[in-house]
Image: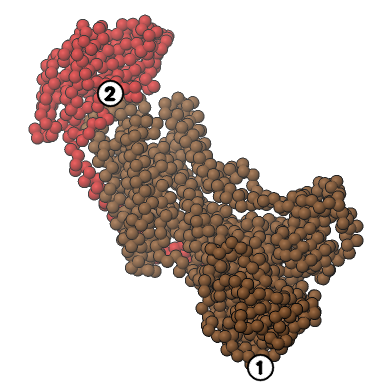
Chain colours: A brown, B red
């Protein structure tokens, strides 16, 4: 997991459980109270209550008895195998996945598929009846039915394939290198796969290992674990064999599955495995949380309902009209099929899938990996982001943030790629301080990293020392060289009793024979040992005033949630400590008091440099960012302030109380914009109180929260009708990730449980990537609107022919097969091309859409596409149809009411307007030419439709015609496909295309231009008169 | 939860149809409906105007006397009268009802060829009584008013004219069919070259006649077809050229296309006999896809009892 954050110094201002217990007398407690941070928050919540684990209370002997094992010899192999058979492998049960066949069948019946199946079925029924009646053209219906079924199956397979492809990306993620565990069995140490661990096994762990199961420690040496994935605490926790707390989660003698051992070694007994572990329980909590339907899925469903509703009602209406016009029922059924096929945009759902996967690809390039295609859009409609702190908002590494020397606080650069530090480095005090920082430090760079940027180099040492080392390296350069020149003679490493670290060095100045004693540690401990303080390079007595200044600085830095270290030094007098003086660290034959205090350094896990900008972008995009962390309120608040989650001028209730000097209860809660809520407070809150907080405060930080509480917070947000995004990396986040409308897991630091529960993975763990995601999500929503508007338009042009055919009894203007060639042929690439359209305006400066009000397909879109552009297109296509017939001898007035004669298979001498007589086949061939002309006209007008759909509000000239090259590819493909169908496949009779005279391609051109002009006028009025009747009715 | 939602949904649905608070019908108030309907009235009014306008412009480019293109209609089809359903002529000699439909069809069609229909010399031209060359009547416009048309005597069809036998031979089990070449404006059929004809037809060759011949479609029917009698102008089994070209409905409203008749006098009864008739000409084509182009097929099924 790569988290190395052990803290030798443990200068916990806020304290952690361990310190409280082990160093009860420790004076730092005072300071803690000073900060108003009452002892350790009791992390009691449901999860912990549920836990009926008492292994931590048992003695070694009792444990041996309970698990029938031996601490020295471990289990026998035979016994282990037995238990393994009983308990199952030590692994988390993967979340239940839907069987592939079910997924596939779902694609077969989802969306429009049902409608098309009905169409196909009707076709076959019609075929059956016609065959029985001996109708010559019966087989057309059989083929049409087969084609419809094929369309459903192929689009289903396509959608399934797209889904599967994105799922596969995930599968590769969850594949892990099998973990090994060092276990004692049959009295011998051996390596076994962690999966085969059983209860009662004795395992040995060492620094860097992942804990393979829940373990009761029997022996421990300097063992520290990182529980952050479980609790969200960024502080490492020490682990020993002592029973320190009633609560199994708090006690020090249990290490948990999937946490990491940072340093030290330990031996322990496995007390639970697999799903029975704490992590296992949280994971099962996550899998118990139902998956919410994504907003885009709801929108698509809504849209499918609209279209299906229109299709069915028009179909039934005209079925009734046809029957009452004395058409045969069979013919009426065939009309019904035609109406359904014309109404259903067969290719649209596939197009939407492609558009979404294109966006998913684009997002993956920007480090947002989307697991579930539909989640692509969800970020765009997100109105609340609940973000975890550690690793998401912060860099997840300690960095020097502030310095205090010469009675002054300096800020250090905490960005990820610092190369210089810009604070005032001219003071002599700084020179002294830097020397201490450099010398009193055991961390070292791993060799061979000279060419790697300093901040990226790998360091051997704990987090604080690493921070100091890198800080020194950045400013001074060649720390290792300095250390070599100032040879270390003696050293006392940090321990928890002393709470300081000390070393004695020769100086690099050959004329100065004095030794330099340097020391760092908990500030108050260091101060105790000092009698002077360095101001501007001068040693001055440490009087009351100076001590108060120190306290002020210490408090201020502590108030920033930073970990503070004090530094002091002493030049040992040459006469007392000659060259050969034997320094002995055991007897401490050198002074450790009356030193000279030099300064303070404070460190923090700093926010990522991109985060404040990202947070403010979210703000301006109308997204509320809430911090939900397991960390301490002060640290959380400090980070929240520094990244802008709590903006500079907003106050919490507590702040106001402090400012006005009144009790917290008297403050009007409405006045506080910000709120910091502790997990403990949250626990006692009712749902209403939580809702009130979420409503009343725009800037909220939840600290010390448990997994359940995260879930409660997410649910609370969802009750406000918000679309909630949750970011997190730990196992403790996974239930919330699952519950969220979109769960976002960290790709690098994230635990597998989190990744499994999430819908999206940030490959670079960078919160700023979320903003990209929001932008892409909003863009795809807008563009899907355009795609759907584009696609729906031509449905009217496909539908009208049928209606006119039924009512006016003209020869059929366009065939069902031809319609399919538009829906699944010429229209596909252009509608995908709209997904590449750039945003019309700054989509990041408007509020997120309201999931119940701002629909994907709203009334305006449907009405404008169906009743305006669609109708325009229809009459354009009808013009072409009438032109073809008229120029071949059938004037429009002759066509009306002609249908029965026209379709009579045994009339081979039907007269046209000029008295010429036509055989059946000649008429059919002309009918196909009519289809082709109608088809070509729709295609030509769809080009215009495509161009106008580029924008919804702006003029095309504002948007730029050439910016989206893919649109032109779409137009080109559209025309190329039409040309191929018309001239290339014109001789294949089954397709009903004929080679058309060239001029018929241009008949609908005036209408294409009219469509474009009309739409420009529409947009002009919308821009000119915002809020007007026109704007309300014409803007979709 | 779910139930509540459903209820809520129902309420919304009703409210959507008629919202009494805001006085909204289907989400719009009366005023709003008026505005939107007015808009669509104007919008569709304009569209209708534009559509009719463009149709008119299109029609302006088309002559009323001749079609712009004849891509599909030529070469012409060959049509048989009476109109037969499923290309089957099926009747019983003893039962007049079974063939009255055919007789009626022939009667109706031949009405126009009655002598009393062809009296006016204003309309009818005295064309030669035997096959002759094309008669060109000028350009395809009404500069010279209507064009005259040739007379065609019904009695040239002899036994099949219906004048001697009002049942056209059906009551004797010797059915007649009348054959016509589909009218195509301006089309001048070219008679076949003598050597391109089947040998049995070369005897009656006339350079001004488009010959027609019927024969058994299948080899096994050759014996069942019996004697085939052909009737036409001057005894020629075909279409004489002086009736061409056709000048269209407007210029020749009374145009009589040349006919010929075929009588099957010795068909085998109580079995299906498939007959194909073909017209021969240099610019007459046959197509596998269009089985009525230059030929037709008919199936006789005559029941003796």
Image-quadrant location for residue B227: top left
Rendered view: A353 above or below A535: above
**In the shown orientation, is residue A485 left or right of residue A818?**
right
Identified at 17% across, 34% down, the residue is B65
Q: Which image quarter holds the C terminus of chain A? A: bottom left
Looking at the image, which is closer to me, B95 or B273?
Answer: B273
Chain name for mark 2: B
Which residue, as the protein is rendered here, is positioned at the far left? B144
Identified at 13% across, 18% down, the residue is B133
**In the shown orientation, is residue B52 left or right of residue A278?**
left
Of helix, strand and loop, which one carries label 1?
Answer: strand
How many numbered markers are drawn? Answer: 2
Is residue B5 visible in this depiction of the protein? Answer: no
- Density class for disc 1 (Cα within 10 Å; few <14, some 14-19, many ≥20) is some
Tell me the CA gap for discs 1 and 2. Answer: 124 Å
- Density class for disc 2 (Cα within 10 Å; few <14, some 14-19, many ≥20) is many
Rendered view: A687 above or below A941: below
Task: Name the front one of labels 1 and 2.
Answer: 1
Identified at 37% across, 46% down, the residue is A797
Chain name for mark 1: A
Of helix, strand and loop, which one carries label 2?
Answer: loop
Residue A467 locus on image (x, y percent): 62, 72
Q: What label does residue A541 carry, if any?
A: 1
Residue A504 locus on image (x, y percent): 69, 78
Q: Find disc 2 in the rendering and name its residue.
A: B77
Looking at the image, which is closer to me, A147 or A473?
Answer: A473
Rendered view: B91 above or below A796: above
The answer to the question of whether label 1 and label 2 lie on touching residues, with beta carbons closer than 8 A, is no
Image-quadrant location for residue B200: top left
Is residue A580 visible in this depiction of the protein? Answer: yes
Q: What label does residue A743 carry, if any?
A: none
Q: Which image quarter holds the N terminus of chain A? A: bottom right
């Amino acid at each position: 997991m790569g988290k190395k954050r052990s803290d030798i110094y443990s200068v916990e201002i806020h304290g952690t459980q361990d310190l409280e217990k082990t160093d009860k007398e420790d004076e730092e407690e005072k300071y803690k109270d000073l900060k108003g941070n009452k002892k350790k928050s009791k992390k009691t919540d449901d999860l912990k209550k549920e836990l009926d684990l008492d292994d931590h209370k048992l003695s070694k002997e009792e444990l041996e008895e309970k698990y029938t094992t031996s601490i020295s010899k471990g289990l026998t192999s035979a016994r282990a195998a037995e238990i393994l058979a009983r308990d199952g492998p030590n692994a988390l049960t993967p979340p239940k996945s839907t069987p592939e066949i079910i997924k596939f069948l779902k694609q077969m019946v989802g969306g429009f598929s049902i409608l098309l199946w009905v169409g196909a079925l009707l076709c076959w029924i019609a075929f059956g009846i016609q065959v029985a009646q001996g109708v010559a053209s019966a087989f057309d219906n059989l083929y049409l039915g087969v084609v419809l079924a094929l369309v459903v199956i192929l689009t289903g397979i396509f959608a399934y394939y797209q889904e599967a492809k994105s799922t596969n990306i995930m599968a590769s993620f969850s594949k892990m290198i099998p973990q090994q565990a060092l276990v004692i069995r049959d009295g011998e140490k051996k390596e076994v796969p962690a999966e085969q661990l059983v209860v009662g096994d004795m395992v040995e762990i060492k620094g860097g290992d992942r804990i393979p199961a829940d373990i009761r420690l029997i022996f421990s040496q300097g063992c520290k674990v990182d529980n952050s994935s479980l609790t969200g605490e960024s502080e490492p926790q020490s682990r020993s064999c002592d029973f320190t707390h009633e609560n199994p989660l708090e006690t020090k003698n249990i290490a948990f599955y999937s946490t990491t051992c940072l340093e030290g070694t330990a031996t322990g007994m496995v007390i639970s495995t697999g799903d029975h572990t704490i992590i296992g329980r949280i994971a099962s909590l996550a899998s118990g949380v139902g998956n919410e339907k994504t907003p885009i899925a709801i929108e698509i469903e809504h849209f499918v309902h609209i279209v299906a509703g229109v299709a069915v009602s028009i179909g039934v209406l005209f079925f009734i009209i046809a029957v009452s016009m004395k058409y045969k029922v069979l013919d009426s059924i065939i009309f019904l099929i035609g109406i359904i096929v014309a109404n259903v945009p067969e290719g649209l759902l596939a197009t939407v899938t492609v558009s979404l996967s294109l966006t998913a690809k684009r997002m993956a390039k920007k480090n947002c990996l989307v697991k579930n295609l539909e989640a692509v859009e969800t970020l765009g409609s997100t109105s609340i982001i609940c973000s975890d702190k550690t690793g998401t908002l912060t860099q997840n590494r300690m960095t020097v943030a502030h310095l205090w020397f010469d009675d002054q606080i300096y800020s250090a650069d905490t960005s990820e790629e610092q190369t210089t530090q810009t604070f005032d480095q001219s003071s002599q005090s700084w020179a002294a301080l830097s020397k201490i920082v450099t010398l009193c430090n055991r961390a070292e760079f791993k060799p061979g990293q000279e060419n790697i940027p300093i901040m990226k180099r790998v360091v051997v040492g704990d987090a604080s020392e690493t921070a100091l080392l890198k800080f020194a390296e950045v400013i001074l350069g060649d720390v290792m060289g300095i250390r070599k020149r100032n040879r270390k003679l003696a050293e006392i490493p940090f321990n928890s009793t002393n709470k300081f670290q000390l070393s004695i060095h020769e100086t690099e100045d050959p004329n100065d024979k004095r030794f330099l004693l340097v020391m760092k540690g908990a500030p108050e401990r260091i101060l105790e040992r000092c009698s002077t303080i360095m101001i501007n390079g001068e040693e001055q007595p440490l009087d009351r005033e100076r001590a108060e200044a120190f306290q002020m600085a210490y408090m201020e830095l502590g108030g920033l949630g930073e970990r503070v270290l004090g530094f002091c030094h002493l030049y040992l007098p040459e006469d007392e400590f000659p060259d050969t003086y034997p320094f002995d660290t055991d007897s401490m034959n050198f002074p450790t008091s009356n030193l000279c205090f030099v300064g303070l350094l404070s460190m923090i896990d700093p926010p990522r440099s991109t985060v404040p900008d990202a947070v403010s972008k979210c703000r301006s995009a109308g997204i509320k960012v809430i911090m939900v962390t397991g960390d301490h309120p002060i640290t959380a608040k400090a980070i929240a302030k520094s990244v802008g989650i709590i903006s500079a001028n907003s106050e919490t209730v507590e702040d106001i109380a402090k400012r006005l000097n009144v009790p917290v209860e008297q403050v009007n809660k409405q006045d506080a914009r910000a709120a910091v809520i502790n997990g403990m407070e949250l626990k006692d809150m009712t749902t209403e109180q939580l809702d009130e907080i979420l409503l009343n405060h725009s800037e909220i930080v939840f600290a010390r929260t448990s997994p359940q509480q995260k879930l409660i917070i997410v649910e609370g947000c969802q009750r406000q009708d918000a679309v909630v995004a949750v970011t997190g990396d730990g196992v403790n986040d996974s239930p919330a990730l699952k519950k969220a409308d979109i769960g976002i897991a960290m790709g690098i630091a994230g635990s597998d449980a989190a990744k499994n529960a999430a819908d999206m993975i940030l490959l670079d763990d960078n919160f700023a990537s979320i903003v990209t995601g929001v932008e892409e999500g909003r863009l795809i929503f807008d563009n899907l609107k355009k795609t759907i508007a584009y696609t729906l338009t031509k449905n009217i042009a496909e539908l009208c022919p049928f209606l006119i055919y039924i009512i006016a009894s003209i020869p059929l203007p366009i065939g069902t097969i031809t319609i399919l060639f538009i829906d699944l042929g010429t229209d596909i690439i252009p509608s995908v091309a709209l997904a590449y359209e750039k945003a019309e305006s700054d989509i990041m400066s408007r509020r997120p859409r309201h999931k119940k009000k701002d629909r994907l397909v709203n009334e305006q879109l449907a009405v404008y596409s169906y009743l305006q552009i669609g109708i325009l297109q229809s009459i354009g296509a009808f013009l072409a149809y009438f032109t073809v017939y008229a120029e071949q001898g059938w004037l429009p007035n002759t066509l009306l009411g002609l249908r029965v004669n026209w379709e009579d298979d045994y009339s081979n001498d039907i007269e046209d307007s000029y008295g010429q007589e036509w055989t059946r086949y000649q008429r059919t061939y002309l009918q196909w030419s009519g289809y082709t002309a109608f088809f070509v006209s729709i295609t030509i007008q769809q080009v215009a439709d495509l161009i106008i759909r580029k924008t919804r509000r702006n003029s095309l000239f504002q948007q730029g015609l050439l910016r989206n090259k893919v649109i032109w590819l779409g137009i080109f493909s559209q025309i190329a496909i039409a040309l191929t169908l018309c001239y290339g496949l014109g001789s294949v009779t089954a397709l009903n295309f004929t080679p058309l005279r060239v001029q018929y391609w241009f008949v609908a051109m005036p209408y294409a231009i009219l469509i474009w002009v009309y739409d420009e006028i529409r947009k002009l009025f919308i821009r000119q008169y915002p809020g007007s009747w026109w704007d309300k009715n014409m803007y979709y | 939860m779910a139930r509540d939602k459903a209820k809520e949904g129902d309420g919304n649905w009703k409210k959507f149809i008629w919202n009494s608070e805001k006085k909204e019908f289907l989400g719009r108030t009366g005023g709003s409906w008026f505005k939107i309907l007015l808009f669509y009235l104007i919008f569709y009014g304009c569209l209708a105007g534009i559509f009719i306008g463009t149709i008119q412009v299109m029609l302006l480019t088309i002559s009323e006397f001749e079609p712009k293109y004849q891509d599909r209609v030529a070469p012409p089809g060959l049509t048989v009268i009476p109109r037969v359903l499923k290309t089957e002529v099926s009747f019983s000699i003893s039962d007049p009802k079974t063939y009255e439909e055919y007789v009626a069809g022939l009667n109706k069609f031949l009405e126009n060829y009655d002598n009393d229909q062809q009296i006016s010399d204003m309309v009818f031209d005295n064309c030669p009584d035997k096959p002759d060359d094309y008669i060109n009547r000028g350009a395809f416009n009404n500069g010279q008013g209507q064009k005259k048309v040739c007379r065609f005597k019904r009695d040239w069809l002899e036994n099949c004219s219906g004048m001697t036998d009002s049942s056209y031979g059906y009551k004797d089990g010797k059915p007649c069919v009348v054959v016509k070449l589909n009218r195509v404006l301006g089309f001048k059929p070219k008679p076949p070259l003598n050597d391109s004809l089947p040998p049995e037809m070369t005897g009656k060759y006339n350079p001004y006649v488009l010959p027609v011949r019927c024969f058994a479609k299948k080899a096994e029917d050759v014996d069942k077809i019996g004697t085939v009698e052909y009737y036409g102008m001057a005894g020629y089994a075909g279409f004489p050229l002086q009736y061409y070209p056709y000048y269209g409905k407007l210029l020749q409203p009374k145009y009589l296309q040349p006919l010929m008749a075929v009588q099957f006098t010795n068909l085998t009864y109580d079995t299906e006999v498939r007959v194909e008739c073909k017209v021969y000409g240099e610019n007459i084509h046959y197509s596998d896809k269009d089985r009525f182009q230059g030929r037709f097929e008919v199936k006789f099924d005559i029941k003796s009892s």
